[in-house]
């Protein structure tokens, strides 16, 4: 029987300290568990573009068969990604974009749509009239730029909606809390906050509670993860009026990587589904997510059993061999 070819994927992850990134890794590992001939080296840059560039170079030096990159910022890693492509490394860019189209494939949801969805739903919630604060992170990250652009584009269609302020920067948690608290205590008339992810949305809610504003301010987040105090749960509990689903693309990134490695046809742009999650559809999405997690637990159990069986089989085979030799 012919041995399957072994592959090594190098994954450059920009951050790893939040649940969204952990979910992305879990999805990748789940998909990789179907490909025992593929291993993955993951390097996380801890939110620093210089480190991320150095790590991409390290993965190239290790001569991985394919690179998956989730770039922290758009500009800084663009040259090294272009260089890697020129040197023949297939590159799958996931979630955030670089500043160029030079990559083998992209996997992720369209952040322009995420922002547009948030804008459309803000109009529904406010009935065409009200003041808005937007908060986001990472001024040079493509999701932040695109979510903002999509949001503003839609708001322009509704003259009664006024975006009072966009606070988009690289926050430390301390600064974030102080600045948002200051802003909201001085602008108690804000009707809605669009927070560019659910972590920030939850913090905004806690600040609103402190200021006694939780009843008068609607909050829209982004991500819609499953789990306690994650987006779906927060919408279900009524903490957030809505969130915009933003899938991590972990599973799809591995699928596309496998197509590329096996010389199968693949698409360059793999755009993932995004939608508004509100009280009407949150239950069904929660059920689906929980089913998927059960199925994964089953797959894990079965692959552990398979590994056990393989082990027993090879022990027996060796024992048989020894017996024959004797
Ligand atoms: C996680 C995260 C998500 C967000 C995504 C955008 O690190 O901030 O909350 O949707 O990255 O790249």
Image: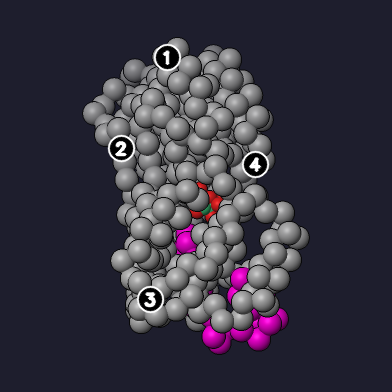
Q: CA distance from mark 3 to mark 4?
A: 38 Å
Instruction: Identify which residue is drawn at 67% across, 54% down.
Output: 171
The residue carrying mark 3 is 160
Q: Position of residue 164 (x, y in %)?
A: 52, 68
- Which is in the foreground here, disc 3 or disc 4? 3
Q: CA distance from mark 2 to mark 4?
A: 25 Å
Nearer to me, 233 or 140: 140
97 displayed left or right of 140: left
Q: Secondary structure at mark 1?
A: helix
Q: Secondary structure at mark 3?
A: loop
Instruction: Identify which residue is drawn at 65% across, 29% down.
Output: 50
The image quadrant where one finds the N terminus is top left
Q: Residues within 10 Å of mark 2 (few under 14, many from 20)?
A: few
Range drawn in magenta: 204-224
The residue carrying mark 1 is 86
* Up-down relation of residue 193 to residue 94 (above or below): below
Beta carbon at label 1 within 8 Å of ligand 1 = no
Nearer to me, 218 or 26: 218
Q: Residues within 10 Å of mark 4 (few under 14, many from 20)?
A: some
Q: Position of residue 285 (x, y in %)?
A: 38, 68
182 displayed left or right of 136: right
Q: Secondary structure at mark 4?
A: loop
Question: Is residue 308 visible to us here?
Answer: no
Q: CA distance from mark 1 to mark 3?
A: 50 Å
**Lower position in the chain sequence, tag 4 or tag 1:** 4
**Lower position in the chain sequence, tag 1 or tag 2:** 1
The residue carrying mark 2 is 269
Instruction: Identify which residue is drawn at 72% across, 54% down.
Output: 172
The residue carrying mark 4 is 47
- Which is in the foreground here, disc 1 or disc 3? 3
Name, please, the residue furthest toward the left: 265
């Amino acid at each position: 029987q012919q041995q399957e070819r072994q592959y090594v994927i190098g994954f450059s992850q920009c951050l790893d300290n939040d649940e969204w990134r952990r979910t992305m890794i879990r999805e990748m590992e789940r998909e990789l568990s179907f490909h025992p001939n593929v291993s993955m080296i993951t390097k996380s840059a801890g939110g620093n573009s210089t480190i991320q560039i150095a790590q991409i170079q390290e993965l190239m030096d290790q001569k991985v068969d394919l690179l998956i990159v989730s770039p922290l910022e758009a500009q800084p890693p663009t040259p090294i990604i272009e260089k890697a492509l020129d040197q023949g490394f297939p590159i799958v860019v996931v979630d955030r974009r670089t500043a160029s189209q030079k990559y083998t494939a992209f996997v992720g949801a369209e952040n322009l749509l995420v922002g547009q969805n948030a804008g459309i739903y803000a109009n529904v919630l406010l009935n065409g009239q009200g003041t808005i604060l937007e908060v986001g992170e990472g001024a040079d990250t493509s999701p932040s730029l695109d979510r903002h652009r999509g949001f503003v584009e839609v708001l322009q269609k509704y003259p009664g909606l006024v975006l009072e302020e966009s606070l988009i920067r690289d926050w430390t948690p301390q600064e974030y809390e102080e600045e948002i608290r200051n802003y909201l205590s001085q602008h108690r008339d804000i009707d809605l906050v669009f927070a560019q992810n659910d972590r920030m949305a939850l913090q905004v809610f806690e600040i609103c509670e402190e200021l006694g504003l939780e009843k008068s301010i609607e909050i829209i987040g982004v991500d819609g993860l499953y789990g306690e105090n994650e987006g779906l749960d927060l919408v279900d509990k009524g903490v957030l009026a809505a969130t915009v689903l933003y899938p991590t693309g972990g599973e799809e990134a591995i699928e596309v990587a496998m197509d590329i490695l096996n010389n199968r046809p693949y698409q360059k742009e793999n755009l993932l589904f995004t939608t508004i999650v509100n009280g009407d559809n949150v239950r069904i999405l929660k059920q689906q997510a929980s089913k998927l997690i059960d199925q994964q637990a089953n797959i894990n159990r079965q692959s552990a059993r398979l590994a056990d069986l393989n082990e027993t089989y090879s022990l027996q085979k060796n024992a048989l061999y020894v017996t024959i030799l004797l």
